[in-house]
Amino acid sequence: MEKIIIEGGYRLQGRVKISGAKNAALPIMTACLLSDEKCVIRNTPDLVDVASLSAILGELGAGVERGEGGTVEIKVESEENSTAPYDMVRKMRASFCVLGPLLARRGRAKVSLPGGCVIGLRPIDLHLKGLRALGARIDVEGGYVLAEAPRLRGAKIYLGGPFGSSVTGTANVMMAATLAQGTTIIECAACEPEIEDLAHFLNKMGAKISRLGTPRLIIEGVDSLHGADYEIIPDRIEAATYIIAAAITQGDVTIESARLEHLAAVVDKLSEIGVVVTGEDKSLKVIAPAKFSSTDLVTLPYPGIPTDLQAQFTALLSLADGISVVTEKIFPDRFMHIAELNRLGANIRKEGPHAIITGASELSGAPVMASDLRASAALILAGLVARGKTIVNRVYHLDRGYERIEEKLSSLGAQISRIEDERGSSEEVIYT
Ligand code: EPZ
């Protein structure tokens, strides 16, 4: 198994280009199951998750070809197999998004339940509620969701749950509704830019979705969808991770191909602690102070601060001047990184869904263990500034969501490299 080694203490400087958004690319790829014509998706990040989903789409009869510069071409060749097996779905929860398209286009689907993961409970009741409201017959048997509907019917659906809406739940129901008979209204739809991007792609395929990016989506069903050529938005979580990397190393970094409008809450919170982010023409400039102040923050559905940045903010605030409280409102147990950050000298206490962070004057390098994708990013950020050497184990998580991270950080002046663990390991890979 591979590990990443970072020699901390180097100030980041220069320019870094952000890749296409993972969480837009994945549902958009599943949307290609809604047509038998070829779809071309541009700016698709080169990530393990994209490769895993390509394999699942292959299993479901689609040809997936990766070309130059992030272009992926997808064309369904056969609609015979509509089963997404456990061994594939458990590796990547986003693959559960094949359910809506399969059901809408083929009238049937058998998709493994994804199960829980290290960031906490990950129920799918809202996905099933929405699809049932569209007239699907759904049974759960032997760890699989079995869904059937000769033709879905438009309906009014409320998709709110105890922690707000569901991102992939909205994706599943919206995709299914595009081919339903009649009009569907989804209330309390997720407003994340990745869902808006998916809706734009579906409209390019011939769907009739309006009020994109709002909590009230209106979808007029159509009889069929055609192929489309589409470019995915930049990854706002990757962009913010590099902004925080610049801030934590007191660097001077320009982030290219990022959209400031997707980062309003993040930039506002950073300005509160003294980190200035300015933007023009899709590039953002980060100017970091020598010392930043503490703050309180709460993760919320978009346009709030994303849960996918909670760990990175926690790493940053572990060096702030004073006490910060970070409250996790989406996945209240998503705090596995705290113990590892404390191994690097941070002073963080967990109390329920809160992390109480007393800013340390410095961190010092140590071996640490990554537990999920964003926790890995947080450990890398801490390693960039920790005195001495930090070794991050289980880096396969990073490859699921950050394209060429060592290369990008090295180009900014970080001392970071990847090595193969000499002892080797047969350790079971744990997915989120
Ligand atoms: C998406 O996961 C993202 N994944 C996650 O990114 C992200 O952390 C999450 O949204 C929240 O923003 C993709 O887009 C592929 P949810 P998803 O359903 O859709 C509860 C990353 O690091 N809920 O929006 O699975 C749920 O428990 C990943 O890139 C229900 O109650 O998340 C949570 O509290 C990790 N019932 C809240 O809703 C349901 O049926 C939001 O979860 C579904 C969810």
Image: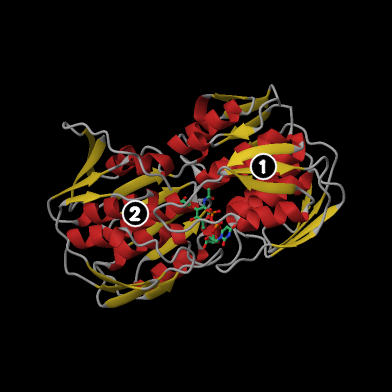
Q: How many marks?
A: 2
Q: In the shown orientation, is residue 30 left or right of residue 388? A: right
Residue labelled with disc 1:
146
Q: Residue at x 56, y 31 (%)?
A: 56
Q: Vertical placement of 281 versus 43: above or below?
A: below
The residue closer to the viewer here, 176 or 319, is 176
Q: Mark 2 falls on what kind of element?
A: helix
Q: Position of residue 386 (x, y in %)?
A: 18, 56
Give the residue type at disc 1: Leu
Residue at image mark 2: 375
Mark drawn on residue 401: none
- Whole-angstrom CA distance, mark 1 to mark 2, is 34 Å
The label nearer to you, 1 versus 2, is 1
Residue 20 at x, y percent in the picture: 51, 42
- At label 2, the amino acid type is Ala
Q: Which residue is most to the front?
A: 142
Residue 116 visible, this angle? yes
Q: Is residue 335 above or below residue 44?
A: below
